[in-house]
Image (spheres, grey):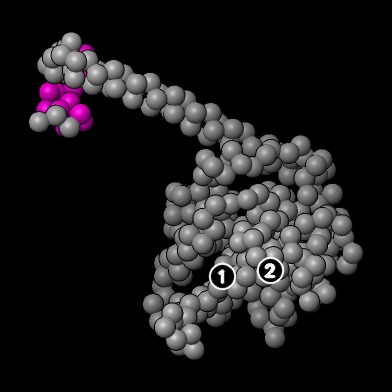
Amino acid sequence: MKMSMTISQTICYNLPMQDIISRQIKPIDQLVFSDDFMFGAVMRDAEICKGVLERLLQIKIDHIEYPELQKSISPFYSKKGVRLDVYVANSDKVFDVECQSYTIKNIGKRTRYYQSMIDIDSLMKGADYSELKESYVIFICLSDPFNDNLPIYTFERKCKEKESVELKDETHHLIFNCAAYEEEENPELKEFLSFVKNNKANSDLTRRIENMVQTKKFEQSFVNEYMAWNLHDQDVLKRGREEGRKEGQKEGIFETYFDLIKSGLISIKDAAAKLNMSESALKESFNIA
């Protein structure tokens, strides 16, 4: 099967706080293919990207191009911290390929949100609902998100009462579990999943990936981008902690005044003045009639 595909990369620096905390920042010389930033950088290489997609989807791709994504969709991606690592599209299909090197929560809802972003992007480009492309949201995970030891989890919508009835919304969510690579029957896919998990290359494709990983570590532009990416994440985390402390202090002050009012040690009028609030707003905050 030959397909002409286009690929575009969107890197969003506004990651959700739980992602920043859970992702350990590695020194550049320790980066591997499955690390977020390295995955995106390596997949910019058209031949490697083509090989990875063919290995995952078990299809033949004619060629890959890298046009820009619809610019008007970028704010939607960045607003909730979505980073579409590799966004692939052809005339009748679109694919979002993610690599998760750390455990993520609510993977089902995350695929749902990514799916919505793909559809919004298509509609913003002028498509009618009936013209929405068949879409694939693909996660490559180092650990098993469902603990059922399957190398691939494929989700498609079917009728609960009768599974032979399909919704036919043409959406597919595939989650590759590298931890169960030994259970995969396809030898090429098995080797790729093993490489992502263990960083040991045993095929032409994975050796090309490994060579690209090592090359990137000595590219000054890659080093600069990686440092900027991490510095921004650290700033976001620092701001989050500072805001959290301020909120905690504010809550503590409110609780103190609430206890004082309940004990009759201060009037609502005086408490409102101290908190720089109206009496009605204070009553509403404390649920006082």
What x and y, as percent, mark residue 242? 47, 25
User: What is the three-letter code of the residue carrying label 2?
Assistant: Leu
- Please indicate, yes or no, whether residue 33 appears anywhere in the rendered image: yes
Residue 283 belongs to the span the image colors magenta: yes
Of the numbered discs 2 and 1, the one sitting upstream in the chain is 2
Query: What residue is shown at x 74% (from left), y 60% (from top)?
Result: 179
Percent across and percent down for residue 15 are 54, 44
For label 1, count other residues whose C-alpha is less than 10 Å away and answer few (under 14), some (14-19) or many (20+). many
Q: Is residue 83 above or below residue 204?
A: above
Left or right of residue 26, residue 210 in this image: right
Marks 2 and 1, how far apart at CA: 15 Å
Between 256 and 30, the one nearer to me in the picture: 256
244 or 58: nearer the viewer: 244
The residue wearing badge 2 is: 150
Q: Which residues are magenta?
A: 274-286
Tell us which disc is closer to us: 2 or 1.
2
In the rendered image, the quadrant that contains the C terminus is top left
Residue type highlighted by circle 1: His
Name the spot of residue 32 as percent of width and height, x first: 78, 49
Magenta residue check for 207 = no
Q: Where is mark 1, residue-wise?
A: 173
**Residue 148: which quarter of the image?**
bottom right
